[in-house]
Amino acid sequence: MLAALTGLGLSTAAGLNAYIPLLVVGLLANFTDQVRLPQDFAWLANGWVLSIIGVLLLAEVVLDKVPVVDSVNDMIQTVVRPASGGVVFSATEAAARLDGSTWMSERPWVSWVLGIGVALAVHVMKTTARPVVNASTAGVGAPVVSTVEDAGSLGISLVAVFLPVLVLAVVAALALLAWWVLRRVRRRRRRVPGRGRARPG
């Protein structure tokens, strides 16, 4: 069960930043025994692959902190983040080792679906909240929120690997945050139409 929580946590982190959990998994697999990658995912610990992921992470960190540009970047990441979630969930063999289930190990596509679904859900929450933050803070809040998201992705990735029992608490907190964000967005949309109405003469 802990292995499944690791996969869940890593795919959640991928929804915030596609490259941080990939880098964490790759580095830990390369330099420690904490993460063991199956043969199909051994490329993730390759030095060249890690270097490319590092460069992409650097670009993501910069672009995601610029108002307007961050929204364009989020559109591009709609494909990248879910894909990353699928990779890290499958690479950690979480699904294959879930309760020793042979059903999961014989159906590797299930881990991809779970990883992609979780990362996509978190990504949607992120892309829904960002325009609200930008509009309400005149863009000043973008770098602050982006930094918090990056730190959250790193923190969740480390928790998923070293303290997977806490993953459910983290996911629950994110779900609560998503509910709060959606309420804010709905309230904002309800106010906008009223601004454009002509005053009675």
Image (spheres, rainbow, N blue to C red):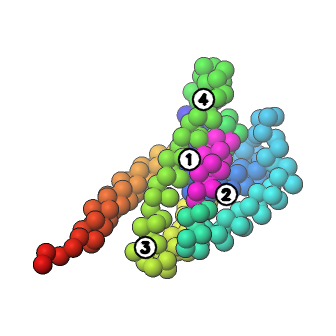
Instruction: Give the overall secondary structure of the magenta segment.
Output: helix
Instruction: Indicate whether 109 appears above or below 70.
Output: above
Mark with earlier residue (4, 3)? 4
37 sits to left or right of 141: right
Density class for disc 2 (Cα within 10 Å; few <14, some 14-19, many ≥20) is many
Element type at mark 1: helix
Residues under numbered marks 4 and 1 in contact, where contact means CB atoms less than 8 Å apart: no
Mark with earlier residue (4, 1)? 4
Mark with earlier residue (1, 3)? 1
Question: Which residue is identified by label 1?
Answer: 119
Element type at mark 4: helix
Question: Which residue is identified by label 3?
Answer: 135
Instruction: Indicate whether 38 appears above or below 169.
Output: above
Magenta range: 74-87
In the rendering, at what x and y percent does residue 197 appear? 23, 70
Question: Which residue is identified by label 4?
Answer: 110
Mark with earlier residue (2, 3)? 2
Amino acid type of the residue tagged 4 in the rendering: Val
Q: Name the residue: 78% across, 39% down.
A: 41
Residues under numbered marks 1 and 3 in contact, where contact means CB atoms less than 8 Å apart: no
Amino acid type of the residue tagged 3 in the rendering: Ala
In the rendering, at what x and y percent does residue 178 appear? 40, 54
User: Which of the two marks, 1 or 3, is nearer to us in this view?
Assistant: 3
